[in-house]
């Protein structure tokens, strides 16, 4: 295994354990926000929006989705025409929304801090590799899309 693949493996492992930690924090700190029904409704709306962003992005990638630091082509259609990393955005919205559903202040905070930081680090690595692989085509795509 190359040094780059080892690094990527540890990054993926960190993200996985980050998800587990946030889920445990969410569950164990349920009820730390005011238990008002509006908070729960807002949480469900945010969760559903996250799912609506995540699912089509995941489906659209299909065979191109890989956990390894390699890419076969740049997907520029559908949700990827506007957003470079909709899967990460969708996951973060789902975690944040579910934290609100559980009235979990610490779940929300850990989502914002831990999951966002782990995703951001992965995005930096992915974008570096994509720029190496696709050059000007990637830079043009990056210039015309949000996050």
Image (cartoon, grey):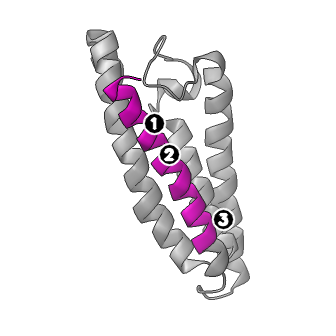
Secondary structure of residue under mark 3 = helix
Crowding around mark 3 (Cα neighbors within 10 Å: few <14, some 14 to 19, many 20+) is many
Q: Of the numbered discs in the image, which one, if any, rests on residue 69?
A: none
Disc 2 crowd rating (10 Å Cα; few below 14, some 14-19, many 20+) is few
Q: Is residue 99 left or right of residue 111?
A: right
Front tag of 1 and 3: 1
Identify the residue under disc 1.
9
Chief SS of the magenta region: helix
In the image, what residue occupies the spot 46% across and 50% down? 14
Taking the image as shown, residue 77 lies to the left or right of residue 139, namely right
Residue 143 appears in the picture as rendered: no
SS at circle 2 = helix
Q: For the point 47% across and 35% down, which residue is it?
A: 85
- Start and end of the magenta stretch? 1-25
Q: Earlier in the sequence, mark 1 or mark 3?
A: 1
Residue at 46% over, 15% down = 74
Task: Name the residue located 51 percent from the left edge and 57 percent from the top edge.
Answer: 18
Callout in the foreground (2, 3): 2
Which residue does the numbered mark 2 point to in the structure image? 13
Residue that mark 3 sits on: 98
Quarter of the image where one finds residue 145: top left
- Between 10 and 121, the one lying in front of the other is 10
User: Relative to the observer, which residue lies in front, 11 or 139?
Assistant: 11
Q: Are marks 1 and 2 in contact (CB under 8 Å)?
A: yes
What's the distance in space between the residues labelled 1 and 2, CA to CA? 6 Å
| Residue 21 position within the rendered picture, expressed as x and y whole percent measured from the top left | 55, 64
**Residue 19 image offset from top left, x and y in percent:** 56, 56
């Amino acid at each position: 295994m190359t040094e780059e693949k080892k690094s990527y493996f540890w990054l993926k492992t960190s993200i996985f354990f980050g998800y587990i930690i946030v889920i445990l924090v969410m569950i164990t700190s349920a009820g730390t926000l005011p238990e008002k029904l509006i908070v729960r409704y807002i949480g469900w709306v945010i969760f559903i929006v996250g799912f609506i962003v995540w699912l089509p992005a995941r489906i659209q990638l299909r065979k191109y989705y890989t956990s390894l630091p390699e890419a076969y082509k740049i997907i520029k259609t559908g949700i990827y025409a506007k957003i470079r990393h909709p899967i990460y955005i969708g996951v973060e919205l789902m975690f944040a929304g579910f934290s609100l559903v559980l009235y979990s202040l610490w779940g929300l905070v850990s989502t914002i801090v831990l999951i966002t930081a782990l995703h951001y680090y992965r995005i930096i690595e992915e974008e570096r590799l994509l720029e190496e692989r696709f050059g000007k085509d990637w830079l043009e795509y990056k210039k015309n899309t949000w996050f």
